[in-house]
Image: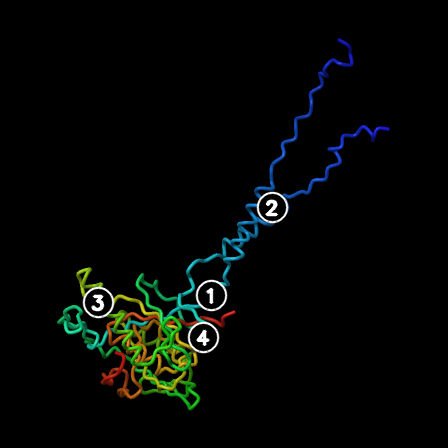
Amino acid sequence: MSYKRRNSSDNQLSINLTPLLDVVLQLITFFMMLIHFGTKLEGASKVVRLPIAPAALPGSDLGMDRLVVSVDRAGMLLVEERPLEREEGRRWWADQAKRRFEGQEVLGGVDEDLPTHVIIRADKDATYGSVRRVLSDAQERGFANFSLVVHRSKPS
Amino acid sequence: MSRATRPSKRPQPPDEVAFPVTPMLDMAFQLLAFFVLTFQVPTTETHIDLYLPASPLALPSESQGRGQAPVARRVDNDLENDIWIRAEANELGDLKTLRLGESTVPDLPALADRLKRYVAIMEDRPLRVRLAADNHLRYEEAARVISICSAAGVAAVRLNDPSAQVGSGTGSIPTPAPNSSN
């Protein structure tokens, strides 16, 4: 009979991988389009729940020299998630400002306002007074550029 | 030569060229795994910029080992461009009343409308806002007011001590409290 003579390789089943490859490449394209590096501002912490301010516009680009601090709901200044008392916080601001003024001296131009961008992530339940105190303490030491981090819409 | 061993003159079908899909698929899966693992839900975070010029205490002094204090400091000569916003809070820290200059504003959208009108009136001159809010006002409420100012085109928002006197009318020059953040 003829089937006895049939080559064994004719019976080999082959999976068609082309549709699978198509789907995978489409998924890769999807993720590549959505990927974003570094758009999330640094210093994010689960301790601090940011306020929602729908009218907030995207701010300008932040400079290279950034300083990120948080204010928790009790109004305490958090530096690298370490709470600082008011006086301790003032000393910390003074120390940060001193380092930067010294850097400016080395570079040969001391300005009255430091170019450092201070990013403040304050809890939505903190009080206006506590945030203003943090701003004031920083401002007294020469920091002038501040960014308040908020959510434009309810975070998912 | 016998007929059986003679090569056929009929053209043979070309050998099938197999494209090796498996390595490509391996690589595609690795790329897919990378993107899936590094995927982050797009954040809704943004930032409201504030420029708060340093107070005189900030000037670097020789005694502290810092630089020589600059003699000339930036002086606000055009304070008449400042508008005061007074935000009062209830005992829970929520926004109770909002005043723009001397007039009461019913809500935040109305504040945005009025500020946009002021910005349009001022044309090229920068409009600045001084926010004097109660200390126990929740920061979320204050952030909303600041963001509305920013979206309305206000050039600068300054945060004042609540004890600072709100002047009569938008053209007045109030004296900021000594510990204000201006």
In x, y percent, where is residue B127? 28, 74
Chain name for mark 1: B
Q: Nearer the viewer, mark 2 or mark 3?
A: 3
Residue at the farthest top position: B1
In the rendered image, which quarter is residue B70 located in?
A: bottom left
Residue under the point 65% across and 30% down: B16
**Circle nearer the N terminus (4, 3):** 4
The local secondary structure at tag 1 comes to loop
Q: Residues within 10 Å of mark 4 (few under 14, many from 20)?
A: some
- Residue B7 falls left or right of residue A75: right
The local secondary structure at tag 2 comes to helix
**Cα distance in 3D space between marks 4 and 3:** 32 Å
Residue at the farthest left position: B71
Residues indicated by labels 3 and 1 sit on the same polypeptide chain: no
Q: Are marks 2 and 3 in contact (CB under 8 Å)?
A: no
Q: Which residue is mark 4?
A: A47
Q: Which residue is mark 1?
A: B43
Q: Residues within 10 Å of mark 1 (few under 14, many from 20)?
A: some
**Cα distance in 3D space between marks 2 and 3:** 57 Å
**Circle nearer the N terminus (4, 2):** 2
Q: Nearer the viewer, mark 3 or mark 1?
A: 3
Q: Amino acid at mark 3?
A: Phe
Q: Which residue is mark 3?
A: A101
Q: Residues within 10 Å of mark 2 (few under 14, many from 20)?
A: some
